[in-house]
Image: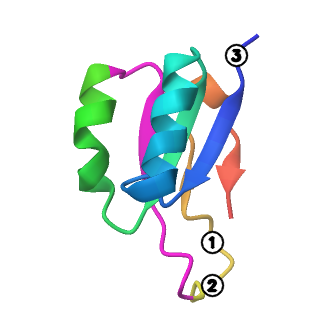
């Protein structure tokens, strides 16, 4: 069974390296980044394994709404 990773800072540095390693291992990654467009190349190369999620962990959300719902490949989990 593949693992599902939520990687913050997935667009660069250690976060990107962890994302690439998880994908290479056959796992699924929800890559969270302030600029999710920086993950477009990984999403295009691995559409069944990588989903980009806009998330800025340096700011507090204005409400308790979820940032987004992960796609069905993760079991439909919700990120708060």
User: CB atoms at circles 2 and 3 under 8 Å apart?
Assistant: no
Circle 3 crowding by C-alpha within 10 Å: few under 14, some 14–19, many from 20: few
Q: Which residue range is magenta in the image?
A: 46-59
User: In this figure, which residue is indicated by the disc labeled 3?
Assistant: 2
* Secondary structure type for disc 2: loop
Q: Is residue 76 above or below residue 10?
A: above
The quadrant of the picture occupied by the N terminus is: top right
- Residue 74 lies in the magenta stretch: no
Label the magenta part by its dominant secondary structure.
Answer: loop
Q: Position of residue 34 (x, y in %)?
A: 38, 69
Label drawn at residue 65:
1
- Residue 50 lies in the magenta stretch: yes
* Secondary structure type for disc 1: loop
User: In this figure, which residue is indicated by the disc labeled 2?
Assistant: 63
- Residue 71 appearing in the image: no
Residue 58 relative to residue 37: left or right: right
């Amino acid at each position: 069974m593949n693992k599902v990773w939520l990687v913050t800072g997935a667009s660069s540095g250690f976060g990107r390296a962890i994302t690439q390693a998880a994908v290479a291992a056959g796992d699924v990654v929800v890559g969270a980044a302030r600029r999710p467009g920086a993950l477009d190349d990984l999403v295009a190369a691995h559409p069944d394994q990588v989903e980009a999620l806009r998330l800025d962990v340096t700011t507090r959300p204005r409400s308790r709404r979820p940032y987004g719902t992960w796609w069905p490949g993760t079991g439909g989990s919700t990120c708060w």
